[in-house]
Amino acid sequence: MTRLRTLDLSALPAGNVSYQHPLWWGQLFLAFTEGSVFCILIAMYFYIRLSMDVWPPPGVQLPQTLLPTVCTVLLILSCAGSYIASEGAKKDDRTRVLLGLLLNVVLATAAMVLRLVALRQWNFSWRTTAYGSINWAILFLHTVDVIADLLFTVVLILIFAVGRHGPKQRIGVHVDSVVWYFLVLIWIPLYVITAWGPWITGGSG
Amino acid sequence: MIAPAEPPLRELDDQRQHEVLDRVWAHKPGLSGWFSVTTHQAIGMRYIVTAFLFLLAGGVEALLMRLQLARADNHFLSPDKYNQIFTTHGTTMMFLFAVPVMEGMGVYLVPLMVGTRNVAFPRLNAFGYWMYVIGGLFLYAALFVNSGPDAGWFAYPPLSGPQYSPGKRVDVWAQMITFTEISAMCVAAELAATILKMRAPGMTLNRIPMFCWGMLIQSFMVLFAMPAVMVASTVMLLTDRTIGTHFVNPAAGGDPLLYQHVFWFFGHPEVYIIFIPALGMVSSILETNCRRGIFGYIAMVMSLVATAFIGFGLWVHHMFATGLPQIGEAYFTASSMMIAIASGVQIFCWIATIWSGRIRFTASVHFVLGFVFIFVMGGMTGVMLAAIPIDLQVHDTYFVVAHFHYVLIGGALFPLFGGFHHWFPKMTGRMLDETLAKISFWILFVGFNLTFFPMHILGLKGMPRRVYTYPGEMGWDPGNRLATVGAFLIAIGGMVFIANVLRSRRLGAVAGRNPWYAGTLEWVASSPPANYNFEFLPVATGRYPLWAAHEDRTVVTGLNNTRREVLVTTLMDAAPCFRYILPGSSIWPFVTSLLLSIGLIGSIFQFWWYYVSMGLGIIGFVGWFWPRTKEPSR
């Protein structure tokens, strides 16, 4: 037995769905890391631009802008789904979570399909000079991130659909929305660079 | 609201509390249980032991190199073997020893120091450890089948590119980086979240122990710097080698210098990633053994933060010899010199702490004082190298080798040994033998200087680094012979240290909870700590809660101890926020790391193995996250 001063915290809630949760912070930190990757890729894009005389290189057509723009708009709209789901998770409202996540997945999948169509229109590969390499690297890494998050979202939908969700899954939905906002936000400069970069910084010399 | 002004005194049954917690936090039995462990003490200890094994391997490689260089025109090692060995030595020491051992100390100590029961993400912690182990084994497996990387630890193209390094050696290096970086980022995210959100109630920002500040700042550096090396090694180098991209091919618009920029944007902060936790250890050791709080706490923290920021603005000083524009180089000279200011603040605060305290010359303090001496030497040659004219003269010579060994061994290894001696009683429950420890210190200290000081002179005499031998008429024999003798002295010092650890672990004096009369929370726990750390979570009543009067000590009650429950507090003031249920043991982190590794290792042969990695990884993560039972909402 020991005699000590005590601070009784039995009245505190167990679990929480907000930015106070360590998982929210952990996810934010991983977003820092991914953001750092993309910032380095952006810097590399301009470095390579400076070391090449003709941009895009001869034989490579200027990028299409319509499809990537539609794709970007769809991605931005898909954030609404994430928002609805994460608000639903805060209020423990299963229907809103499911609706929000489904809306997010449908819009994001549509965006990815458009992105694949747009990629097929590129008349260059990653082997077509460093121009091809950097453009493909940006698109590939962002697409992998998006698909990984979509798969995670599908798993969340399954968990909620079969009714095995609890506080851990609710914070999962909230944190998933943070990842999604990040992926969409970081896409905007990447979109500007890959779709408009050669129009803006192109030419020879 | 943190606490009522006068929390009530109560009789607490710690024996009963121990029985309940012990059951909830127990490891699963058997071999699969061993792979399922997620408690931070076990994972932290595994990190430390594994990293020390890699230190031994790296040390053996160093001895082989010193034997080869002991005399001119030696043929003990072939040039090819020598290349593999120096590359593996550097890679091991940086990626498999220095960073992981600091992470391991952090994983072990941070939850104890901030007064909680585990790290914020225990399964991520286990996953990171397994990724590290697999990455390390991958490198050594390659070395043993004569496919060890051979293009230096930074693998500069064009040497490391597809044209000049055919075969799989460089690919092994590039993908090994991925493993260790994933591991480092897992630890960084979980430690930053633990320090920011799981501190004991009352541990406001200006009460965080110095070592935790070090780990927090280091974690942020890892998050921002490590991605750069992954971009350099996998996006640029590996894809250039495997699928024909042109990032480093100047004939197709790429640029080998771009690789250097991206690599050193990681590589320079890397030095501080290793060094900043060590600074935290030094402060913790000194304040305990000088029996006073650290002098200039806020100045110390600010200078750590400043070091981290400036550390990101120095990378070009590794590239002074590449012919960059002079105006740019001048900027990097200035920032390289600026970092000496932040380091100087630290040194002066330590001196003031020693001066105004009553110092106890324990073995750990010996290592700290050794650190101050060696690190100041390394810092001074650093300022010399920041001057471009000197750098151009001694670039890629043994002067640089001497400099960075002074900085890294002096700046990180000596504090680490100090920290290890300091916290060994906490980790094992036994005291190290102080006499043996001091003997090992003196052998290491003399051996270190004997090995590396002559290298300054060899460098000034023009001996280039990374040559497997040299002709007799260069006059480099005496310096090299001294260095070889010194290297074996270091090995002897290391053996004395190991003998001391092995002996003291079983036969050392019983330590008790707080053998050094330290002030921070890790010394409240039993030695070694139970899986749950504290019978009752502590409240931080000051910067040094254990130096407060016993009647003022406060603990938390009211948590549900029939599950792994901890406390989440607010970021700035550490006011209690909610109760957080941590996940228990699980084999899935281990399984997931194995599944991911299959694809990552395959990817050095064919790109499509990345898709395999992703597919298998998803299976692992679903197994990891799928809820086993429906969760109760309260």
Image (cartoon, rainbow, N blue to C red):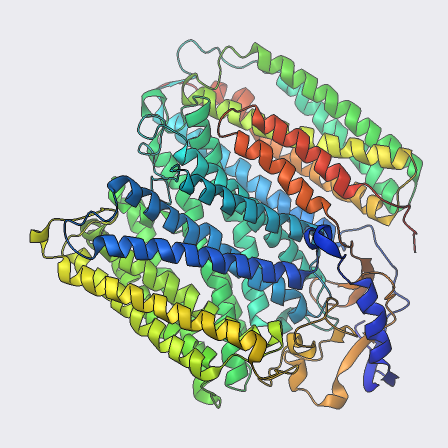
Q: Quadrant of residue B41?
A: bottom right
Image quadrant where residue B534 sits: bottom right
**B426 left or right, relative to B484:** right
- Residue at the far left: name it: B473
Give the tally of numbered discs. 0
Q: Nearer the viewer, residue A32 or B516?
A: B516
Q: Position of residue B63 (x, y in %)?
A: 31, 57
Which residue corresponds to the image point at 23% horizontal and 57% vertical from the top-left? B399
On screen, residue B113 above or below A169? below
Quadrant showing the C terminus of chain B: bottom right
Q: Position of residue B149 (x, y in %)?
A: 38, 39
Residue located 45% across and 45% down the image: B140
Give the image quarter of residue A76.
top right
The residue closer to the viewer here, B193 or A165, is: A165
In this rendering, the answer to whether B99 lies above or below B509 is above
Give the left or right position of residue B623, taking residue B106 as reference: right
Q: Position of residue B438 (x, y in %)?
A: 41, 80
- Residue B539 lies, with reference to residue B481, above or below; the image says below
Q: Tell me which residue sits at (64%, 86%) in the image.
A: B547
Query: Percent from the top left, x then y, of residue B387?
Result: 25, 56
Say if residue B42 shows up in the picture.
yes
Q: Is residue B324 visible?
A: no
Q: Quadrant of the N terminus of chain B?
A: bottom right
